[in-house]
């Protein structure tokens, strides 16, 4: 289980998180939804141990993030792959750091997503880079998978391939996937639980099916309603 307790974080004059409280259950696919600048990326970086809170605390299975990096796979929004690498080079880099790397899974995903190891990062499309980043992240057997805007700026066919890959490889009940995005429609059918945040605070959270049934709205419509009422 992931917990953020009264977590605040400021970058200069920008209040990224403002006393946020989150509980993310284990074994679920959780949507962390909100507009750009809502605090989604900062929340994920807190969980991954890349940022520290100014106040409050973050716990993963009751331990600090710095003690849990071995069980967290983080897919950042930024394109962190060096242009001179091939996909094989990138895989060798990740493999060297994480003992939970699954070579068979890596090779299956290359085939499933129609990529080749000798492809050079500087020569492939944005969609292919997105798929390469996904492969490098989920080829680990990490119990917690954090994904920051995994569908941002890529074409609809690549989005479908990424979602199909997540469905294909998700270990229900064993693995927790947190997907941070403002593009809710693409992952609406994927998530079990949802957390809507804005201005560094939780505006609404709950089970996706129950919220849709209660309100008779899609998750995107529910987010608009929640934020409109909060103003």
Image (cartoon, rainbow, N blue to C red):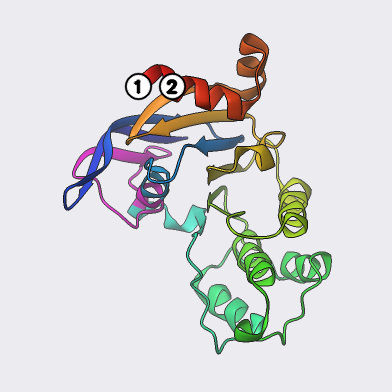
Q: Which residue is mark 1?
A: 231
Residue at 77%, 80% in the rendered image:
116
Q: Which residue is mark 2?
A: 228
Q: Which mark is residue 90?
A: none
Mark 1 and 2 residues: CB-CB less than 8 Å, in contact?
A: yes
| Residue span colored magenta | 45-65
Mark 1 vs mark 2, CA separation in Å:
6 Å
Q: Is residue 145 left or right of residue 23?
A: right
Vertical arrangement, residue 221 with respect to residue 121, above or below: above
Could you say which is closer to the camera, residue 90 or residue 199? 199
Could you say which is closer to the camera, residue 69 or residue 191? 191
Vertical arrangement, residue 3 with respect to residue 211, above or below: below
Q: Is residue 76 left or right of residue 114?
A: left
Considering the numbered disc 1 on the image, is that residue within a helix, a strand or a loop? loop
Residue at 72%, 82% in the rendered image:
117
Q: Is residue 200 left or right of residue 158?
A: left
Q: Position of residue 204 (x, y in %)?
A: 46, 22
């Amino acid at each position: 289980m992931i917990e953020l307790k009264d977590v605040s974080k400021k970058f200069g004059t920008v209040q990224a998180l403002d006393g946020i409280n989150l509980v993310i259950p284990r074994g679920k696919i959780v949507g962390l939804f909100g507009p750009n600048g809502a605090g989604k990326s900062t929340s994920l970086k807190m969980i991954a141990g890349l940022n520290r809170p100014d106040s409050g605390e973050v716990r993963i299975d009751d331990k600090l993030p710095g003690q849990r990096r071995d069980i967290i796979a983080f897919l950042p929004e930024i394109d962190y792959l060096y242009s001179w690498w091939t996909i094989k080079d990138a895989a060798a880099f990740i493999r060297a750091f994480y003992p939970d790397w699954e070579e068979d899974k890596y090779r299956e995903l290359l085939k499933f997503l129609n990529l080749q190891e000798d492809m050079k990062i500087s020569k492939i499309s944005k969609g292919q880079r997105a798929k390469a980043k996904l492969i490098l992240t989920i080829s680990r057997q990490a119990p917690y998978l954090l994904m920051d805007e995994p569908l941002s700026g890529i074409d609809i066919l690549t989005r479908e391939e990424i979602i199909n890959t997540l469905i294909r490889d998700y270990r229900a009940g064993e693995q927790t996937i947190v997907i941070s995005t403002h593009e809710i429609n693409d992952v609406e059918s994927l998530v079990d639980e949802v957390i809507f945040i804005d201005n560094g605070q939780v505006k609404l959270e709950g089970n996706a099916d129950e919220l849709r049934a209660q309100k008779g709205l899609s998750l995107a419509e529910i987010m608009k309603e929640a934020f409109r009422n909060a103003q």
